[in-house]
Amino acid sequence: MFVIRACRRIHCYKSRGQPLDRVFLWRVLFIMAACSISNINAQIRYSVPEEMKKGSLIGNIAHDLGLDVQRLRSGRARIVSGDSTEYVELKSDKGILVVKERIDREQLCAETTPCSFTFEIILDNPMELHHVTVEILDVNDHSPRFPKDEINLEISESATPGAIFLLGGAEDLDVGLNALQNYMMSPNYYFILKQHARPGGIKYAEMVLQKPLDREQHPRLSLILTAVDGGNPQRSGNMKIEVNVLDANDNAPVFNQSVYRATVEENSSKGTYITTVNASDADSGTNSLISYSFANFKGNINGIFKIDDKTGAITLSGVLDYEKARKYEIDIEAKDQGGLGNSAKVIVDLIDVNDNAPVISVMSFSSPVSEDATVGTTIAIVSVKDVDAGDNGHVVCTVDRNTPFKLQSSLRNYYTLVTDAALDRERVAEYNITITAADSGLPALSSKTTLILKVSDVNDSPPRFQKTVYTTYVTENNQPGLSIFTLSAQDDDWNQNARISYLLDETTVGGSPVSSFISVNADSGVVHALRG
């Protein structure tokens, strides 16, 4: 009986005083690096003025993160997600952030202040995630602008001193000191200017009669209303006021409410009824006829709502989106035929509808993963966002239960996919990992993404024979070199790790070494007789 032992063939070159093969060393270092992933979180904030030229410096990201430029290059530093990332570019070879496209603060944030956008920078090997916020400072690049270049007022000469005539307001897209600050009116004998601010902060002007009008002396007055901002240099806009003096209209319209409130779902169709405003005028005849109109034009009010100038009924004429605006404040003017007017406010609150499914973004994914990876090894980092509000925007993220993986979350809206059990390539060589994000709306909306993870082989399975003892017979006086038996062993590993070599154990038979009687082919396992 002969004992034959099988072992793996591994290409590992070793000689006296010589190092291991360089390729082999690099493979070892790569495996060590892949197993040392860590998460580092930092938050940086920059402030830059709007309208900067393309290529302008935002900040030295390498210096501010305490990293050198070589680390940015070796970690393949990149911007992976965030709001308005088309405006910035990461120059990893210099370690700086620069302006990628011209930034218009008014286009980006409208009236929202402070105006900023955020994004994330990720580095690999080891993995680092850094949050960057860029605040956009306003530049005085817009002049105040009136909705009309000219308005015409018809005022009765019987109007008493103290009568108020609404002039409306100008719009300035800038914010802070650069926004609208003041109104001025050309000097005249009859009127003074008063300024007010509505609860929303919108400034508007009123013209107050100081002395009775005399149509016989001055049947027509031409005035200029000027709106100025507080920028340096200062900007301004003008509107011409043409006053035609008429007879006898001494009562202004009066609303039955100063504030109207209404609610509407964001997915309401065009034509949906909102509310009705109502004003009355104590005058009679044509002087009591009232027309209704919108007094403010910010937020594209005219494109979203419509008011019947005769009945005061307000209906929906555009598309609502709760994620863009949660409420609208509409200033309404009621004017009679003589030009006297009054104002009221309509506040429309939007009701959120669950119309946005969660969005899953894979920020980093490592495949393949070694089958001897420790439990807790990071496989991927994903972000999940839902722009709806309340329960409609509350997202729960899950992964298939029948896989050896789990999700961990240490930062809002971010999840880390890690191994939750030992891997075995010989059992499962590839996983389809499905990540599901579902919100809490009724009905709930969800989205899925699937990661295909391959498991790389580790030489952890020894070769094995089907039997522990094989018996064969050889006739005497056989020819030397005769094939007498073929052995076969199996190895569950893959590729190089599964290649098998066959060797004879150095035992003796009748005092002679077994190798003097038979030999075995190292590759095929064929046993040959060496003697006759």
Image: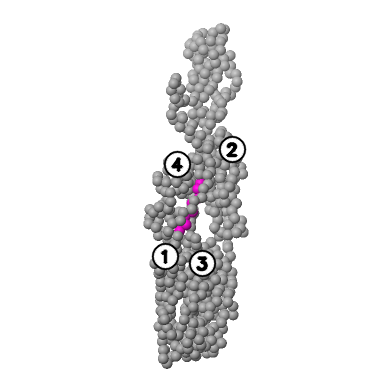
Residue 272 visible from this viewpoint: no
Q: Which residue is mark 3?
A: 319
Please tell me which of labels 2 and 1 falls first in the chain. Answer: 1
Q: Nearer the viewer, mark 4 or mark 1?
A: 1
Task: Please report the bounds of the magenta region as a residue range.
Answer: 129-136
Please tell me which of labels 1 and 3 falls first in the chain. Answer: 1
Q: Nearer the viewer, mark 1 or mark 3?
A: 1
Q: Which residue is mark 2?
A: 375
Q: Secondary structure at mark 3?
A: loop
Q: Nearer the viewer, mark 3 or mark 4?
A: 4
Cα gap from disc 4 to disc 2, whole angstroms? 28 Å
Question: Are the two marked residues, 4 and 1, in contact with CB atoms closer than 8 angstroms?
Answer: no
Cα gap from disc 3 to disc 2, whole angstroms? 50 Å
Please tell me which of labels 4 and 2 falls first in the chain. Answer: 4
State left or right for residue 371 relative to residue 233.
Answer: right
Q: Nearer the viewer, mark 4 or mark 2?
A: 4
State left or right for residue 391 relative to residue 241.
Answer: right
Percent position of residue 14, x then y: 46, 22
**Residue occupying image coordinates x 51% and y 10%:** 516
Mark sitting on residue 140? 1
Q: Nearer the viewer, mark 3 or mark 2?
A: 2
